[in-house]
Image (tube, coloured by chain):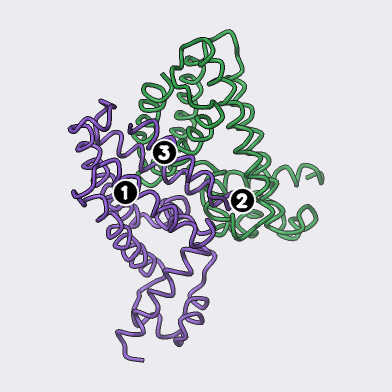
Chain colours: A green, B purple
Amino acid sequence: MAKANVKEQIVTTSLQLLHSKGFNATSVQDITDAAGVPKGSFYNHFTSKEALGLEVLQRYTEGVGQMTALLRDRSLPPLQRLQQYFARMIEGNAANEFQFGCLLGNFSTELSNQIPAMRSAMREAFDGSSAVLAAVIAEGQQDGSIKSDAPATELASFVNDAWQGAVMRAKAEQSREPLERFARVVLGRILS
Amino acid sequence: MAKANVKEQIVTTSLQLLHSKGFNATSVQDITDAAGVPKGSFYNHFTSKEALGLEVLQRYTEGVGQMTALLRDRSLPPLQRLQQYFARMIEGNAANEFQFGCLLGNFSTELSNQIPAMRSAMREAFDGSSAVLAAVIAEGQQDGSIKSDAPATELASFVNDAWQGAVMRAKAEQSREPLERFARVVLGRILS
């Protein structure tokens, strides 16, 4: 396998493993075994498991960023965009039977103290998704479809955090209901 | 040290360690070292680290249950009880500089898949705190201080999950702001 392919193979395999099993429950050996690469090759590409964790977080955040493109589609009214966005996010969680949670949330609880370098990456990811949500909420406030007069940035960050809490509860219960409840309360009550 | 005291020493030390460092980042050796007991004594009291994790979760949930007593104090109006409850919960997080998060939330993201036996304990804990919140919200709806006509159980579970998300964000950012924002939006907008 070419060197660049080995690295890519490690990152994509790790994204799956660290998301499903968590960071500390996954060893470098688990990763190289699952990736089908020699254990020694890991350290040709990453100085440490922590360095890999940062790269995996970066890759995951890029995926979340692509999801938020839907929120910028001005051909749809703001509330409809929010509905479609969260419906897709719910299906994303359904794809793994609500068992994996959000990698960003999992890393936040597991690694915020253990790997301080991750905190700035997590802050950037949370701030990024909150900013996109805030722009849609502000649009909805301007066109009158969202009645709340709370600052859009405040509502957006609250909603973003509430989503993380709902994903956590869905993971604990392996159930869709916390995510559907989130959608009912946020879209039907807070942002309407 | 008497046998019962060794066990108690292990549980109280583990509560602190597992809360601050997480389950998989803490070894049995870390625990017995911190507790000042021989490593071998661990297995006189617990069949496994997982069994200890369940006992620690139980102990933590009892502490949360004591906090919710405030919500049942009918000498205060419902909204005031909710304000005081969340203010105390915020101070609880401030006591460790927002770095530990909620043990229940941490275990939910880290262990829901790894230790299936924990899921029923977590569900019970979440359902318990949601039920107490629902009772206060229903009181507030009855006396007219809470305007929302959404079912109290729905609002309570949503608020409980949103709190977990805010605690997660506070931990990721080591900041009080996500918790203050939670209080502003929940108490000032959703439940008012």
* Residue in the picture at 37% in, 67% down: B56
Q: Amino acid at mark 1?
A: Phe
The numbered dot on residue A34 is 2
The numbered dot on residue A166 is 3
Horizontal arrangement in the rendering, residue A80 relative to residue A185 (left or right): right
Quick one: SS at disc 3? helix
Q: Quadrant of the N terminus of chain B?
A: bottom left
Instruction: Judge the density around disc 3: few (<14), some (14-19), many (≥20) Cα neighbours within 10 Å.
Output: many
Instruction: Judge the density around disc 1: few (<14), some (14-19), many (≥20) Cα neighbours within 10 Å.
Output: many
Quick one: SS at disc 1? helix
* Residue in the picture at 51% in, 82% down: B33
Q: Tell me which corner region of the image, top left, top right, bottom left or bottom right, holds residue A173.
A: top left
Q: Amino acid at mark 2?
A: Ala
Q: Residues at marks 1 and 3, common chain?
A: no
Q: Amino acid at mark 3?
A: Ala
Q: Position of residue A72 (x, y in %)?
A: 61, 18
What is the spatial separation of the Cα atoms under label 2 and label 3, in whole angstroms? 30 Å
Q: Which residue is mark 1?
A: B126
Front one among B81 and B56: B81
Q: Position of residue A12 (x, y in %)?
A: 65, 42
Q: Position of residue B129 (x, y in %)?
A: 29, 49
What is the spatial separation of the Cα atoms under label 1 and label 2, in whole angstroms? 35 Å
> In this rendering, which labeled residue sits more in front, label 2 or label 3?
3
